[in-house]
Amino acid sequence: MGESIIELKGLTKRYGGFAAVDHLDLTIDKGEIFGLLGPNGAGKSTTILMMLGLTEPTSGVVRVCGVDSTVNPIEVKRRVGYLPDDVGFYENLSGRENLIYTARLNRLSQNEAEARVDRLLERVGLQQATDKKVGKYSRGMRQRLGLADVLVKNPEVIILDEPTLGIDPIGVREFLELIVALSREDRITVLLSSHHLHQVQQVCDRVGIFVAGRLLAEGNVAELSHKLFSDTEPYIIEATLGATGVGNGGTHTEALKDALLGLNHVKSVTFDEGRLRVGGAEDVSADVAQAVVNSGFRLHSLTMKEYGLDDIYTKYFEGGEVYGKIA
């Protein structure tokens, strides 16, 4: 169990009879990258605002870096950096001048500000554009500058709201690599709110799925996959087989099916023109491979299908049955 840096208990925000956030319980550890997923209006932004002390909860507790955001929002802001989807800078100033201005606002001396800003510009890959006016920056450059801007005050937590919108694929990859480096090397906790499931799966240690103000589920992809597909087939093994080398192939096929269905945790077996699909409640790859060989077939390939975040996300929105089961 890690060191908790964000703790939400029974967190609720109501506007009249509407619950924007409904009894949210969530703990995020130091150095973790946590992804917030959900459609517009799910409660992600309201949750972030309460974490930052920018809006008060109707009930519940929100603690960030050990500080109650409702009681002492200024202290939270000192220790948390926030990067919105569109960062505002002084367009007629250079990237370096913008960052030095931010550093001075955070009470760094001129010498400290200049030294820290130069280090950050190098870290985010903007050392060649330090004196370029921000009005001439590309979208990707602005987001990297925004990341440097939130790092000026050495935050313990950074919150990123759709940080890769409008960035080209190479820029997205570089930005995500920066996020991972900050988490792994500096143990900065990252809260990433995004609609891009593939990007979230690439970098996040855990994700939380928000719908209608409620956290339906949270965990890593493997945990969510097992929970969500446990009543069906959480593990799918696919194999390509060669001929048995003997006659009466149909009999061999039936014998293989019977052998596989006799294995513990196997739920289904289908075989079609040399392609085998085995659905199970556990990973039985080794047993499947052994059964294939014992049945006289050649095993050309064997792979485990892994449910991705897109599969999980889609499953949560298939209807009320899943919602009621998980919620």
Image (tube, rainbow, N blue to C red):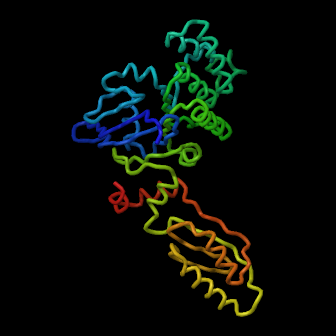
The foreground one among 21 and 162 is 21
Q: Residue furthest left?
A: 17
Q: Which residue sits furthest top?
A: 110
Q: Is residue 210 left or right of residue 311?
A: left
Place of residue 163 in the rendered image (x, y in percent of width and height, measured from the top left) = 54, 34
Residue located at (38% from left, 51% from top) = 216
Q: Who is closer to the viewer here, 138 or 276?
A: 276
List x then y, in percent, for residue 322: 38, 60
Where 17 sits versus 270, above or below?
A: above
Eyeballing the image, is 254 above or below 159?
A: below
Tell me which residue sits at (70%, 89%) in the image.
249
| Image quadrant in which you'd find residue 324 | bottom left
Give the residue furthest to the bottom. Answer: 248
Residue under the point 53% across and 15% down: 102
Residue occupying the point 50% across, 68% down: 281
Image quadrant where residue 14 sits: top left
| In the image: residue 184, left or right of residue 318 | right
Residue 293 percent location from the top left of the image? 70, 79
Relative to 87, residue 166 above or below:
below
Is residue 114 shown above or below 176? above
Q: How many tags in the picture?
A: 0
Q: Residue furthest front?
A: 1
Quadrant location of the C terminus in the rendered image:
bottom left
Q: Position of residue 257 (x, y in %)?
A: 59, 83
